[in-house]
Amino acid sequence: MLLDKDQDKMKTENREEFSLSMIREKLANSRGQKYWRSLNEIAETEEFSSWVEAEFPNKSTIKQVDRRDFLRFMGASILMASLGGCRSVFMEDQNFVPYVKNPEGLVPGNPLYYASMHSLGGYASGVLVRSDMGRPMKVDGNPVCGKGTNSVTQASILDMYDPDRSKQVLDRGVVSTWDFFFKAVKNYLETSNKSGKGVRILTDFTSSPSFIDLMSKIKKQYPHLEWISYEPVSRDNVLQGSQLAYGQVVETNYHLKHAKVVVSFDADFLESMPGAVKMSGDFMGAKKIRGNKADTNRLYSFECAPSLTGANSDHKWPVVPSQMESLIGYIAGLLGVPGVTGGALPDNVEANAVDALVKDLLKNKGKSALIAGDFLSAECHAIVHGMNDVLQNVGSTVMYNKPVVHEAEKSYESLQKLTHDMSNGMVDVLLIMGTNPVFTAPADLNFSEQLKKVKLKAYLGIHEDETSKCCDWVLPSTHYLETWGDGRSSDGTVCLAQPLISSPLYSSCKSKESVLSRLFLPLGSMKSKFEEPFASEEIVNNFWMEQLGSVSYQKNWKKSLEKGVVSGTSLPTVNVSLNLRLNVRTDLGDQGLEVMFRPDPTIYDGRYANNGWLQELPKPLTKLTWDNTVQVSAKLAEREGLKPEDVVLLELEGRSIEAPIWIVPGQPDNTVLLHLGYGRDMNGLVAEGAGFDAYKLRNSNDVWNAAGIKLSKTGKRYDLASTQMHQNMEGRDLVRTGSVAELSKNPSFEPEGVHHRKPMNLYPDNIFEDKGYQWAMVIDLNQCTGCGSCVTSCQVENNIPVIGKDQTRRGRHMHWIRVDTYFGPRSGEANLDNPSVHFQPITCMHCEKAPCEPVCPVGATNHSHEGLNQMVYNRCIGTRYCANNCPYKVRKFNYLNFGDNVDYPTKNLLNNPRVTVRGRGVMEKCSFCVQRINAARITAKKENRKIRDGEIVVACQESCTTNAIYFGDKNDPNSEVSKMRKEPRNYVLLEELNVRPRTSFLGRVRNPNPEIEAL
Amino acid sequence: MAQIFRPSSNTVIRTVLFLVASAPWALGYLLSMYSRSPYNTKVGVPMDQPIPFSHRHHAYELGIDCRNCHTSVEKSSFAGLPSTETCMQCHSQIWTNSPLLEPLRKSYETGVPIKWKVVNRVPDFVQFNHSIHVNRGINCNQCHGPVQQMHLTWKGNSFEMKWCLNCHREPEKFLYTAETNSGLSPREQVFNLYMKYQQGVPLTAKERSLIRGYDYSPTSDELNKGKTIVKKRGIEKDQLEDCSVCHY
């Protein structure tokens, strides 16, 4: 097409202009422009300006029309419009289908909430699921367990409705039944070996007490059967580190509520670590500032892979992975950790700064926490345990209990043993359940080749994927919202899972518990009141009846289910005594280029690759969607002459992959960061063609960090879809930050020289009566971590469509809330290699004098009496004038009937019935979750009272783990939101336009160590 | 040779030209008439149902309260349709052999629900909530027409936006409190009126109009009473007119 050619031409021109040295120069000379969003912005490339100038760049995807065609279309449009008025001409007959039996407790039309559990990597987190007439609709945090959820939990509901799910039992590709499968395995067990020798069960990580109990029962029946649990994102190192330090494997829990100083060694405790939801809530909660005085915590971060934690830190140093151990050893030496010798500082970390850090730590003994990342070596973890011990943090901010996930400390070791056994022909039956080793196992194990030597191999999974392709039997698995279960959170508290749907969406799906008990336990070994033997409900119920005792079970079980948690199940604290003897390796010689493998920020280890919501969620730091990249530092790119989207060849120990690069400011030099989980070869429309497979490079000796990777140019290019350039705000002071010291002097953080913005006004000041409820929102930038769970939550609640990579590249993404990422100076100086990072969630501001309203020719957007800028979809004719006139660029246009143009059977089940599904050619935007406002208003009116403060929780606010978003009635002086609006840090975006936004922001307060700032 | 065009041709041509020119308008007009006609809107057209259920028999002759079957009408957006089990409360005892009830018994045995045809429906972009209307004292028949007189149920009103706005703009025209039972809550007023009607208590003209669901222009006295009710119940008329009350 003509347009694509144009685009390519434009691209090639820019690529000549894009030069990192020029960017560096411009940054160094920059005065006015303090914050930047992308490298292209600094370089002022043509590509960038084309994005900024057009509201919807690349909008003309259809052929340009001449005048005659235009008139022809106009005529047709008028006719169609008049027919549109006769809507019932096209109204088809519909049926009402009432229940046969009324379900208990259901008021048709009203939602029901059930407590359940979502588990990731074996760690359970309690969730509260909204069900609408029997359909699970939205997953949110269970208030009993803590506020908020991450994006993965929010989006996990989509997997249940996934039309690409595995739906039937397949025997070597031929449709079969469960009975045939059970017979096949049982035949083997009866004829060849009654002790279970040669039978291996490979499952994902689990902390479920009932499942572990079930497996021990099975082991009693078949003593030689072996159970291996493996997941690619394991915590072997973490748990082995505690073994090194304390002589026993313990689970570490951090209580950051009262920690004054936190030091993170490549630990992303704000987003990806287990328990991050709670930790981010605690840590950011302690940052809460009222007035212009701050008694806040301080976060130092030494970081290998750029993460949200580094972005939210007060001091950050990029450190190459191989130098991490010696750095930690050096700090341990300063703190006087017994038994640790050696250690040195990397070049880019100043000794004075570390001295100041150590002084800060010693000042806050018992009130600090040092956290080592999941992907550092066991030695690093051991030393960090030692440091916490010396600083008397153990028992106050750092707690230990028994590990909750079954054998997580030796997951790679047992996988290696399994592969070894397979290659020796010792495995006859292998049941793989819920984990995908063919895709995720280290490449040198050659898992798929060894798997061929197994006689009977079966795979139970949600999708047909890489592993199922290598197995004889493909078995459909239930989704976690379709089955009963239990699991432990990291402190041991047991969460319960109950199904949200009366039977699995696809009837032949079974859970791993019921399959295993059906295979290995004698029939009738449980007293069954269920139609099907060994239903997951029966297994969980029976286990807890045994545990609680039948009297207590009768009394407490329903209550526990209601709460979602079995109370009193948290594991007792383990007493530890430090016993370290370590000599830190310091002189490693030239490591060459180092590579880091990390789980993806959105699709995790690849299991969510077919989840459109997560694929389209921009990754926090790069704002990339639909792909992973080879992330490199600016310096490396400069040396190698690389530009973003250049495809490079990566070689590591004889294996190689090709992938596009992306430059990430703040990444340590001489490193390459690869995110796992992309490049899937599975039966899934969404996952198809997204990204490249980084698992192919991994070695079993170090699965997370490896040295000696070779990078070479290929001359090819690959298009990436980043939303970073869409909707730019042209370097005005949109995000405001300041230090604690500045807070007392200039709490609004208003930059100097812009005091002339007292708005001029042509129109009367009060354009509508300020009475009744007046809705307003405040976003506290100091609390926002930038994780993006609000984006997904909004997408789930408001039926926002997924549009795909191509459309995202055209700037048409539909998210009603976005999180802008800004890079800024560090210690007052522009810095390309280690910039500060700031996040700012942006939604419709619901301006009181909204510029979008007067330009709409049909009045499709106008103001409600409660101060909402309302959008009437059925009136909208799609002129897009409103979006053109919106200074905040928050209006989204539905170009291609995104919500409705793919037909699949579960589509109608998935949509939230409380929100209209918008069609093609309609503008849409944040509505302040007006469906929730109306629901609350109706409830209040029925009870003859006013809406209480905090009664309306909007979707983005609901999912936020750190309480960064406030919503309420600004006319009520006692409401949280009106108090926040009176905070001295309160400011609105583009105040000089005098549009009077209802959404305001609170500036971000950093708390740098003054001694380090002074260096 | 005779002339081809006689003087009358002028008239013919003019008429044809006029007709051709006015054809688009005529077409538009016809279409709009068509779309508003009961043929299309189904207003007043009794609808065939799998079981010929009579509201007149159940609600008027037997005096069963609306809420017995439409259980959630006061509690949720959806009025609720009776489950097979609800029908069987009575029909497991009476009319147990009626051939008309065969689909009901079959549904009870097999567990497959009865598929009723939808009579009243708003478009997908309208969010209607029954509970708040009933709780504010809006009579069922105000929208649904004289249900207690319907054998086979028909649609009482077209549910066009213009028609909704009649009440959202001037609720005082439609709100009512019974003189004798003014202590009842607005919600109870609704069902009290049906009870009175069913028992044959004489009704006022306003009450009759509410029962019949027909247009009625209230007297100035009734209008003033309506206005006091609006004030008393704290109904915010401004807010009732906001788009986002129904469209979101």
Image (spheres, rainbow, N blue to C red):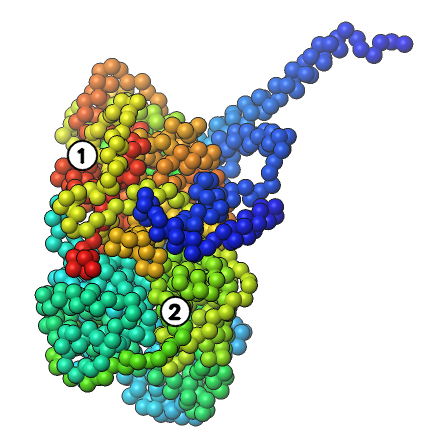
Residue A726 seen: yes
Task: Indicate the position of residue B74 as horizontal and vertical percent values.
Answer: 25, 40
Q: Nearer the viewer, residue A537 or B221?
A: A537
Q: Are marks 1 and 2 in contact (CB under 8 Å)?
A: no
Q: What is the chain letter for disc 1?
A: A
Instruction: Quickly name the residue at label 2.
Output: A670
Q: Secondary structure at mark 1?
A: loop
Residue under the point 51% across and 42% down: A59
Q: What is the chain letter for disc 2?
A: A
- The answer to which image quadrant residue A240 occupies is bottom left
Residue under the point 32% across and 72% down: A321
- The answer to which image quadrant residue B11 occupies is top right
Residue A369 seen: no
Disc number placed over residue A971 in the picture, else none: 1
Name the amino acid, label 1. Asn
Residue under the point 69% across and 12% down: B14
Q: Earlier in the sequence, mark 1 or mark 2?
A: 2
Residue placed farthest to the top in the image? B7
Q: Secondary structure at mark 2?
A: loop
Name the amino acid, label 2. Asn
Q: Nearer the viewer, residue A171 or A250?
A: A250
Task: Indicate the position of residue B241 as horizontal and vertical percent values.
Answer: 31, 28
Q: CA distance from mark 1 to mark 2?
A: 55 Å
